[in-house]
Image: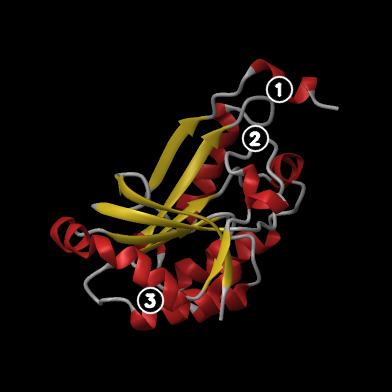
Amino acid sequence: MKAPLMAIARHRIAIDGEGVTTLVAFHGCPVRCRYCLNSFCLRPEGLRRSMSPEEVLDEVKIDNLYFVATGGGVCFGGGEPLLRSGFICRFAEIMPPSWKFTVETSLNVPIRHLKAMQGIVSKYIVDIKDMNPDIYERYTGKDNRQVEDNLKWMASNGLSDRTLIRLPLIPGFNTEADRDRSRLRLQEMKFAHFDEFAYLVLEDHSPAGRP
């Protein structure tokens, strides 16, 4: 079992989970965000190598002491890691049980991937964009019905307390009022941990300047 990877980034602190964390970034994503920070995940040249779970473990375990000392571990991101649920489940079987295990996801995947990983993830970081379906589709090129269904499943299965939801202010797409409405909707679904921030967009990357 091998999966396409963009990068393995070591010694990340307070970005992808608790403590010292190694980010394993998968190639490939189901959405097409207008201001994607990792656009290489969609390009052929963004594929750096293919690795098995065992090969990834061999590479990241060099930082085991840091993980144990700081309560850190491994974060799977990308791209979209949940599309590689089988790979991740295998990695969880063979990694040291003391490591924290974080997944950073758009959550726009079939629910079977989420169910496959039930019970093995320490923390989810969900990049929600916006809960308004029109805003979401304009920004990502895809509807958010799977996202909402997956959020409801997570809340009903006791995962809301281990979920951090990112709520960005996206220039040209949503407003602070839109973000407030998204947060209220998520709070009604029993989510309580949010990361609110604003995208910094260069002028030549503005929606009005795009073809």
In the rendered image, is residue 115 in sight?
Answer: no
The answer to which quarter of the image holds residue 157 is bottom left
Mark 2, secondary structure of its residue: loop
Residue at numbered disc 2? 35
Mark 1, secondary structure of its residue: loop
Residue at numbered disc 3? 120
In the picture, measured across the screen, residue 56 lies left or right of residue 2, that is: left
- The residue shown at (71%, 40%) is 139
Q: Tell me the distance, in whole angstroms, between the alpha carbons under discs 1 and 3.
A: 39 Å
The answer to which quarter of the image holds residue 129 is top right
185, 145: nearer the viewer: 145
Mark 3, secondary structure of its residue: loop
Mark 3 belongs to which amino acid?
Answer: Ile
- Residue that lies at the very extreme toward the top in this rendered image: 203
Disc ID at residue 206? 1
Q: Quick one: label 1, few (<14), some, or many (20+) residues within 10 Å? A: few
